[in-house]
Image: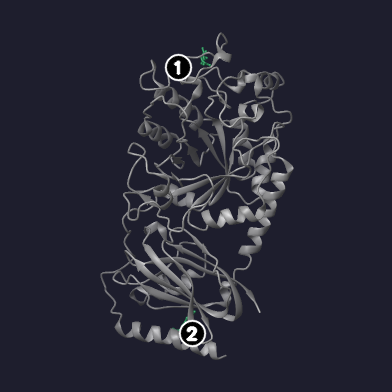
Amino acid sequence: MAWMTSILKLTCLLFATTHLFTIPISAQSSPAPYLRTPSSRQLSWHRLEFYAFLHFGPNTFTNEEWGRSQTLPDIFAPTSLDIDQWARTFSDAGMAGMILTAKHHDGMALWDTNTTTYKIGNGKWAKDRVGKGLDADVVRMAAQSAKKFGLKFGVYLSPWDIHRDPAMPKTQLSGTAFDEPQIFGNSSPGDYNEFYSQQLTELVTMQLGDGEKVELFEIWLDGASGSNTVQTFDWAKFRDIIRLHQPDAIMWGHQGVDARWVGNEDGATVVTNWHTISRTQDQTRYNEAQLQTGVRDGTYWTPAEADARLRSGWFWHAGERPKMADALMDMYLKSVGRSVNLLLDVPPDTSGQIPKEDLDVLLKFKAQRDAFFGLRINPSSLIANASSVREGNYKLYGPLNVLDSEGSTYWAMNDNEKTGSLVVTLNSLHTIEAFIVQEHIALGQRIGGYAIDAFVDGAWKTIVTGTSIGYKRIDRPSTKVKTNGVRLRITQANAAPLIHTFQVLGMKH
Ligand SMILES: *[C@@H]1O[C@H](CO)[C@@H](O)[C@H](O)[C@H]1NC(C)=O
Ligand SMILES: *[C@@H]1O[C@H](CO)[C@@H](O)[C@H](O)[C@H]1NC(C)=O
């Protein structure tokens, strides 16, 4: 029990100094926000963490990734579409929502739009369904299934539209009803921004069969283009349309307004990640490395989302295989574990369902996550002591607040204290597997350096060091230690740190 006594001595020492010298400042009350803070829609979005992307459309049937708008709507003909199967799979896999490609670059719309004849509704599959009194609006059907399975729903609407881009020849469509005006591009006749705004308006005002409005959690405005046609997008107008009809929806863009690209399509980011950047969608594009890291103390709260693929393509292709659960776990720890939401693409096949092997691996990955998070040491068996507590107010700002991951409580120090530490004493020896740390980001991202120590052989041994924390950080120490005491040290912060959660994952001996 020598280790126990030593830890207590250490915490007593920490306490002795702070109790003697901490002078309550009466003007202090709750900590003031630090620079940029998330909007309430962003705060809710951070908590979703992991959700599905669905690339589905003509490319599914032509074995393409970027179709050239050369196929007629008849091409879209799933043999046994089952959208409930998608939603059930994602719900079982512990994903929070799903985002569907309502229109990919090829321009073919999956919903019953009035803006173009180039929509699946003008194909045989949809006409047959409508003839039988069935819905053929795949976007609405997906919204309905998402709701049924308790998932959030979002749409992808490609800004680049090959179907309307004069630089992209569409010889197969000439002379058909799908040969439409080439309005894409600043120097093209017509107003593409107006056209896009109409498409967006249709999607954000879409209703379910019973007349209830479809609620969107995210709208994905892809930054990709494979053409030299220059089109200046009216992002402010698109934002206003989204805000007016879907005030809770995140507008995802290359760099904003509400969430940014993480700079790669691997589902991973570098260790330092800031939720803020200092440019908008209308300004020069950040490069990929800049998007990964973000800008500390930046002008806008524009957190990153990592889009990644379960298979090698975004659309389904025969012969491709899903990644293994281990690879997905690694991806998850390098995205969600680094404060970045993970958007994992799971493409339906030509039957209109998610292939069984993909479904199986998602469930295996879910079991792996459950086992990992199941290692969390029961918080009621822990003791937490802090180097100091804001105004000595243990109830509001005390260290015990970090042990519960629910609610919005946090451990805080006085405003002038930017470094400090928190000791967590375990009631028995554990092999440490991981730590989860969260800042109380509602009041801004403050921390730029931290370390986690374990009490081993009578001394503190540093087993994790890091830079940013933000919404959530998951660290797995590279060396395995057995201990019954760990310590989180905030080594650098630009404002008094606010720690929402400090979880310890480990195996008991
Ligand atoms: C839009 O709706 C109007 C009125 O119903 C119709 O005349 C027009 O052809 C439609 N346009 C497209 C592109 O579907
Ligand atoms: C440490 O925190 C516990 C509550 O978790 C408290 O009972 C104990 O007095 C604290 N120890 C010190 C040295 O302040």
Mark 1 residue type: Gln
Residue position for label 1: 182
Q: Residues within 10 Å of mark 2 (few under 14, many from 20)?
A: few
- Residue 244 falls in image quadrant: top left
Left/right of residue 392 with respect to residue 333 in the rendered view: left
Question: Is 273 rendered above or below residue 313?
Answer: below
Q: Which residue is drawn at 61% across and 77% down?
A: 430
Residue 419 shows in this picture: yes
Q: Could you say where residue 452 lies in the image, as x and y percent from the top left?
A: 47, 72
Q: Could you say where residue 193 lies in the image, as x and y percent from the top left?
A: 40, 25
Residue position for label 2: 459
Closer to us: 498 or 157: 157
Q: Could you say where residue 115 lies in the image, as x and y percent from the top left?
A: 49, 20
Q: Does the residue at mark 2 contact the one at mark 1 (Cβ under 8 Å)?
A: no
Question: Which quadrant, please, contains the C terminus?
Answer: bottom right
Q: Does the residue labelled 1 lie within 8 Å of ligand 1?
A: no
**Label 2 SS:** strand
